[in-house]
Image (cartoon, rainbow, N blue to C red):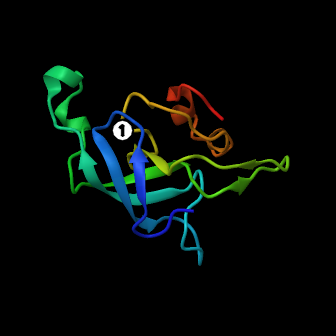
Amino acid sequence: MIYLKSLLNVIDNSGAQVAECIKVLRHGPRNFARVGDEITVVIKQARPLNSEITGQSANNRVKRRDICRAIVVRTKAPFRRPDGSTIRFDDNACVLINKNGDPLGTRVSSVVAKELKDLQYNKIVSLAPKVF
């Protein structure tokens, strides 16, 4: 479960490394986010901007103190699947998205949860090397 001020690893190549949750979007009285929920984050740590090395344009990169939207793709808190199995990941992780829901980066570096496919985040699932 991701609460206010929770730190998340950013697993895409948008330039961010660590993000902090500042708002959970689109949920009524619930004040936490699960896998597949949309949150607003502030970038706490970012990779240095060097377009010669990364090959990515500077307008698609994020910097420290930028405010972005993100999708939670992994949580440390265990959650239950409809088949009865319980899944728990080693860390909290997210992927940065734009207003339309498309990922900012062009790669996802590690595993994402299978629930994203059911929630129509097919672009994130297709970029991920493994879906678990």
For residue 49, above or below residue 53 = below
User: For numbered disc 1, what is the local secondary structure?
Assistant: loop
Q: Residue at x 14, y 21 (%)?
A: 52
Residue count near mark 1 (Cα–Cα under 10 Å), binned few <14, some 14–19, many ≥20: many
> In the image, residue 26 lies at what x, y percent?
53, 65
Question: Horizontal placement of 12 versus 78: left or right?
Answer: left
Residue at 25 percent of width and 36 percent of height:
60
Rendered view: 43 above or below 6? above
Q: Is residue 113 left or right of residue 5?
A: right
The percent coordinates of residue 20 (x first, y second) are: 36, 60
Would residue 77 appear left or right of 10 to someone viewing this image? right
Image point (62%, 42%), residue name = 116
Picture residue at 66% right of the left edge, 35% below the top = 132
Image quarter of the N terminus? bottom right
Q: Which residue is mark 1?
A: 104
**How many numbered discs sit on the rendered protein?**
1
Name the spot of residue 38 as percent of width and height, x first: 50, 56
In the image, residue 92 sits, relative to residue 12, either above or below, namely: below
Task: Pinpoint residue 109: horizontal percent, then vertical percent.
Answer: 44, 30
Q: Is 7 above or below relative to 82?
A: below
Q: In the orientation shown, which residue stands out farthest toward the front? A: 90
Name the residue furthest bottom. 29
As drawn, the residue found furthest toward the right would be 83
80 or 103, nearer to the observer: 80
**What type is the residue that disc 1 sits on?**
Leu
Decide if residue 42 is on the left or right side of residue 3: left
